[in-house]
Amino acid sequence: MRILLVEDDAPLARALEAWLAGAGLTVDHAASSEEAELFLAANTYAALVLDRGLPDGDGLALLARLRRAGHGLAVVVLTARGEVQARIAGLDAGADDYMAKPFSPDELLARLRAVLRRNGTFQGREIACANLVFDLDNLSLKVGGQVVALSAREAGLLGLLLRREGQVVTKRLAEDQLFGANDPLGSNAIEVYVHRLRQKLDAAQGEAEIVTVRGVGYIIKPRA
Amino acid sequence: MKRLVRRAATSLLTRILLVEGITIVVASLAMPFAARTVLESSVRAIERDTLRQQAELVARHVIPAPGGHWQVALPREEMAIYATGYDGRAFAVIDARGQVLAHSPFFLPDIWPQPPRAWHEQALTSGPLVGLSVPRAFANHNVRILVTQDQTRPGAVVDDVVRSFLAHYLVWLVGLLLLMPLANITMLWPLLRRMRHTARAATQLAPQDPGARLDAAGLPAEATAMVSAINGLLDRVEAALALQQEFAGNVAHELRTPLATLRLEVGRMAAEPARDEALAQIARMAHVLDQLRDLASLEHDAAPAFERFDLAGLAVAVVADRTPDVLAGGRSIALFGAEETVMTHGNPGLVAMAIANLLDNARLHTPPGTAIEVSVARPAQISVADNGPGVTEEDATRLARRFWRADHRRSDGAGLGLSIVQRIAHVHNGRLLISRAASGGACFTLSLAEYALP
């Protein structure tokens, strides 16, 4: 899979290129918006890793031009401006994800994969966490190679948690995603499904756990 | 007391009143003397004129006689003046040797010890009498006509007039002079009060409100120049401050890219304790840069826009954002009181920044295994408590000071966080309270209650 890295800082670009190549990705490197546009015109990329502070303008301006031109490729924006407000407010200008420098390269890779999955461009629609493997297409779970049967709601919840591995899924988000507007919803409906999922993961000796963040939501992570 | 005296001595009003007081005293003493001198010389001139007219009159009616017995044949009504001793009026005709040739009934030759000898008009004084000697020539006889008058007699009221005039004059003079300081106080007091107001306004100028300037309206032109000079100084200070804040923000920003490179390079090293330590230090540097950036943006925007927002919803979002870091360090976190909306008034970006800093503070200054509890309460309060070692009373007073850490030996966190929270509380007219949690740990409460809507 080929991605384009747009970063003007040469040392960071070299390190990032090496890291992403080590993760099995083919990386082209552009040092400016202009160069990036030349690369984009010549090749097809699965994703764009875009720095905001470029010598010929804000990376977001390039992104806006790409989106206007109908480019649907997945974009992860790297920025030195990482205000909590900016992250909470979400992603403007059409970025699929937003990461503040300095970032964990593992997290960048995970976000890149998640973004590609969301875009449907990632080959293999499977998400793994510890010994859990979840297929996003047929919503099936394997733990240590053994198939674990899940209800539709349980599978939906697990998919939601796994797609955002390492991040909190708020109770509100889970409710909105799992239940339609017409569903009668008990106040502890999500807790019931979390409880059932935990029982099934425990029974199958799953090495990932669903942690309750009281008052906020849930997060799935490999068992310590 | 000494300061009061010094202040009074340098006060403009005191100086003006002092100068006026001295002027009044000098004027009250000197003016009567001057007025008296002027009046008296005028009176003397009038007296002398009167005497001269009388001497002329007498001269016109002199009848010379060879035997020495001259006569003065005045008309009857004129003679009446000299017929009584009243007024001490008298005349005499005296020859060159001092011989009296003729005189009025009440002329007293003995009181003129030195008969006038000068051959020109001459004024004479003897006791209460004043006189004038006027030379005349009649048929080879040079004579002097001497006319006298008693100053002390009731008829000569001039001195009394002068005296009484002066008595009244003095009262008026002092009265009018006293009006001067009164007028000055009336005119200066409002101006000086305006200046004191301006001075008080100047003491209330704070770095949190760098756009504030002194108001020169109503001040005298001299003070206006000073106020505009001060305002000019404030402009320059504000510009310098803005430049410095921009610089701090830019430095924090510029350091991120090399730090990201370092993070990547270190991440590629083989896993060993040295790498983990390096990664921890990089994370700490990133955290300090976050705080510097927060502080710079906080100081840059002195009057952030306020709006109505849900504090509970914001708390959920910020806690969700920070939870992975909290869990990664082996701590737990829970949020209470956020099930229902808690509407309040403020700047949600800044409040989010404050909550994030309180969470980072709890995460970085407690041992692994610590339970962090976040509570939202009406009207607009959020607290972050932990069951860690807590803060001592001494620490609590110093905690919010910039660059101060609870444990100087520890290498995580820069202590900037709490000063950021305190600044945000200040912007919201709220407070940051530090207390002991029920579990014995530290409890930081950010209260925005002042702006809460009922």
Image (cartoon, coloured by chain):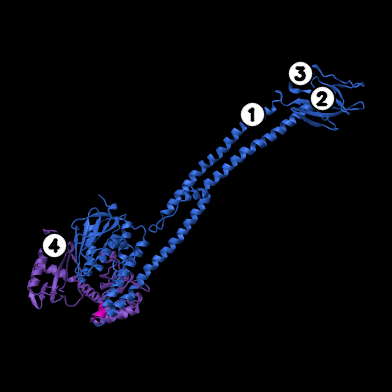
The residue shown at (80%, 22%) is B107
The residue mark sitting in front, 3 or 4, is 3
User: Tags 2 and 4 in contact by the CB under 8 Å rule?
Assistant: no
Q: Which residue is tagged 3?
A: B84
* Parent chain of label 3: B
Q: Which mark is residue B356?
A: none
The residue mark sitting in front, 1 or 4, is 1
Mark 2 or 1 closer to N-term? 2
Badge 4 element: loop
Badge 3 and badge 2 in a common chain: yes
How crowded pointer 1 is (Cα within 10 Å; few <14, some 14-19, many 20+) is rated as: few
Q: Which residue is tagged 4?
A: A179
Question: Based on the displayed image, in which of its 4 quarters is residue A204 positioned?
Answer: bottom left
User: Tags 1 and 3 in contact by the CB under 8 Å rule?
Assistant: no
* Parent chain of label 4: A
Badge 3 element: loop
Question: Based on the displayed image, in which of its 4 quarters is residue B211 positioned?
Answer: bottom left
Which one of the lettered chains is coloured purple? A
Badge 2 element: helix
Which one of the lettered chains is coloured blue? B
In the image, residue B189 sits, relative to residue A160, either above or below, namely: above
Total numbered badges shown on the rendered structure: 4
The Cα atoms of the two marked residues, 3 and 2, are separated by: 17 Å
The residue mark sitting in front, 3 or 2, is 2
* Parent chain of label 2: B
Q: Which mark is residue B109?
A: 2
User: Tags 3 and 4 in contact by the CB under 8 Å rule?
Assistant: no
